[in-house]
Image (cartoon, grey):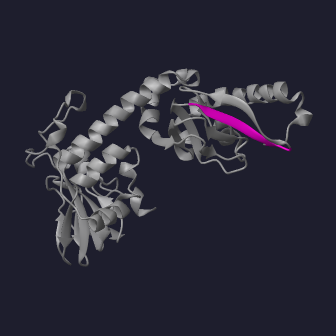
């Protein structure tokens, strides 16, 4: 399992429930609540730690693969970069201790860090010059479930609890509300239960394309599907005489699912007609979350082939794009 997907702030390997385990500990931090729906905090109150161009470049390189930040837009990502501060670490320093209140979220720039858990402080993982830790205690108002100790000298980027929760929770809340409205407009998804649509909304990743950009390429392996938030997308297939447009999609439309359903290469290319915003669903999330819609999507394959026959006259005139 990659470093980015392992979180040792809350551990499934700990048998005793965390709520019971720490029931006797103080609750000062955990009494705090944050309601993103009613957060009208003055933007001028943001935490900003000035950085040199060199520091900002190093920070950008450290956070670029952190999954937690994948759904943030450019403005939110800049707020994250502004709010993080540098922490110099020496070998044997304790960064977080099991059972303590959560204070900061950490992104590793350099150094080796070991994670320990349990009364015997069993070593369970080593972070080697990349990764992040500390987020789950902040997100879920739970004590630290592991100890992290530096094995070598190193550098970390840290963000305080309040700023972390405001940026990440508010972003998640806004994203879910926006994408729920988008998904409600997709007829195929009417078969999903409300909680299934919420899970789908949480899994979507915003992407933008400029006019003329190619979003997917015919013949490529499929990595996911797309829901259009704004703008127009032209769907085209390659024929001997060149590319031919077979469809033009707008807000509420979706594309890219065909290759995921058939487990074949992309059957067509997609281009941004103007500036386009899409919500991207990767292949793993597609298979996990859209099972209830699979029969509908399979029926749509027949509709797709019917459209091609109308355009080209017969199946004989259609290049085998399966």
Question: Is residue 262 placed above or below 197 in the rendered structure?
Answer: below
Image location of residue 244, percent across then percent down:
77, 36
- Residue 84 in sight: yes
Image location of residue 272, percent across then percent down:
59, 38
**Is residue 249 found left or right of 181 in the rendered image?**
right
Highlighted range, magenta:
232-240
Question: Is residue 283 placed above or below 144 in the rendered structure?
Answer: above
Residue drawn at x 23%, y 78% is 153
Residue furthest right in the image: 316
Q: Quadrant of residue 179?
A: top left
Question: Is residue 15 placed above or below 310 in the rendered structure?
Answer: below
Question: Is residue 255 placed above or below 148 in the rendered structure?
Answer: above
Which of 120 and 254 lies nearest the eye of the viewer? 254
Quadrant containing the C terminus in the rendered view: top right
Residue drawn at x 65%, y 42% is 260
Residue drawn at x 78%, y 26% is 307
Image location of residue 225, percent across then percent down:
58, 39
Is 234 one of the magenta-colored residues?
yes
Is 84 one of the magenta-colored residues?
no
Q: Magenta region's main secondary structure?
A: strand
Which of 292 and 80 lies nearest the eye of the viewer? 80
């Amino acid at each position: 399992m990659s470093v980015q997907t392992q979180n040792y702030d809350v551990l499934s390997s700990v048998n005793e429930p965390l709520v019971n385990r720490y029931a006797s500990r103080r609750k000062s931090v955990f009494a705090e609540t944050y309601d993103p729906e009613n957060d009208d905090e003055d933007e001028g109150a943001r935490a900003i730690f000035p950085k040199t161009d060199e520091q900002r470049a190093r920070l950008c390189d450290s956070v670029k693969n952190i999954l937690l930040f994948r759904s943030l837009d450019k403005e939110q990502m800049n707020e994250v970069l502004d709010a993080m501060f540098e922490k110099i670490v020496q070998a044997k320093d304790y960064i977080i201790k099991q059972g303590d209140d959560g204070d900061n979220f950490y992104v590793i720039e350099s150094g080796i860090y070991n994670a320990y858990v349990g009364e015997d402080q069993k070593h369970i993982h080593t972070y080697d010059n990349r990764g992040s830790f500390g987020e789950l205690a902040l997100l879920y108002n739970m004590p630290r479930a592991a100890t992290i100790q530096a094995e070598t000298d190193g550098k970390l980027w840290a963000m305080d609890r309040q700023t972390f929760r405001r940026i990440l929770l508010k972003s998640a809340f806004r994203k879910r509300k926006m994408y729920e409205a988008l998904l409600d407009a997709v007829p195929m998804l009417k078969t999903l239960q409300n909680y299934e649509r919420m899970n789908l909304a949480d899994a979507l990743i915003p992407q933008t394309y400029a006019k003329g950009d190619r979003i997917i390429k015919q013949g490529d392996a499929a990595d996911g599907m797309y829901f259009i938030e704004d703008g127009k997308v032209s769907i085209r297939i390659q024929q001997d005489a060149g590319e031919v447009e077979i469809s033009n999609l707008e807000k509420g439309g979706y594309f890219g699912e065909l290759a995921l359903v058939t487990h074949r290469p992309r059957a067509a290319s997609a281009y941004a007609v103007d500036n386009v915003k899409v919500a991207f669903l990767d292949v793993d999330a597609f298979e996990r979350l859209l099972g209830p819609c699979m029969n509908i999507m399979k029926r749509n394959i027949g509709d797709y082939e019917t459209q091609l026959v109308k355009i080209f006259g017969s199946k004989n005139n259609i290049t085998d794009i399966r």
